[in-house]
Image (cartoon, rainbow, N blue to C red):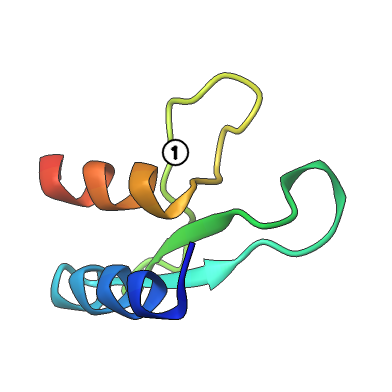
Amino acid sequence: MTNAQEKHVTRIAASKGYLLEKVGKGPHHGRFALVNKKEGNRAHSGIPDAEFSFTLQEAEDWLAKH
């Protein structure tokens, strides 16, 4: 994961009405959440054991489908 990749996914998310946020500590450290700007809720990733968190690639793929 590079800073450029993170910026790229952040721009895609913003264009679709989402914020890309770092998840933080715990088992999901290094993962990201997509937060709906209007509703304020996190997008469900559909990934087992990571219900609301994504890698950058998973977030980009999810955004491409939605």
How many marks are shown on the rendered structure? 1
- Mark 1: which secondary structure? loop
The answer to whether 25 is drawn above or below residue 45 in the figure is below
Left or right: 51, with 17 as reference point? right
Q: Residue at x 29, y 68 (%)?
A: 9
Q: Residue at x 40, y 72 (%)?
A: 6
Left or right: 12, with 19 as reference point? left
Q: Residue extending furthest top?
A: 48
Left or right: 42, with 8 as reference point? right
Q: Nearer the viewer, residue 36 or 54?
A: 54
Q: Position of residue 38 (x, y in %)?
A: 31, 73
- Residue beneath disc 1: 44
Q: Residue at x 22, y 72 (%)?
A: 17
Q: Looking at numbered disc 1 in the image, what kind of residue is underneath it?
A: His
Q: Which of the image's four quarters has the C terminus? A: top left
Q: Residue extending furthest front?
A: 2
Q: Residue at x 55, y 43 (%)?
A: 52
Q: Residue extending furthest right?
A: 26
Left or right: 20, with 53 as reference point? left
Q: Position of residue 11 (x, y in %)?
A: 23, 79
Could you classify mark 1 by the number of other residues whose Cα lies within 10 Å: few (under 14), some (14-19), or many (20 or more)?
Answer: some
Q: Position of residue 51 (x, y in %)?
A: 57, 33
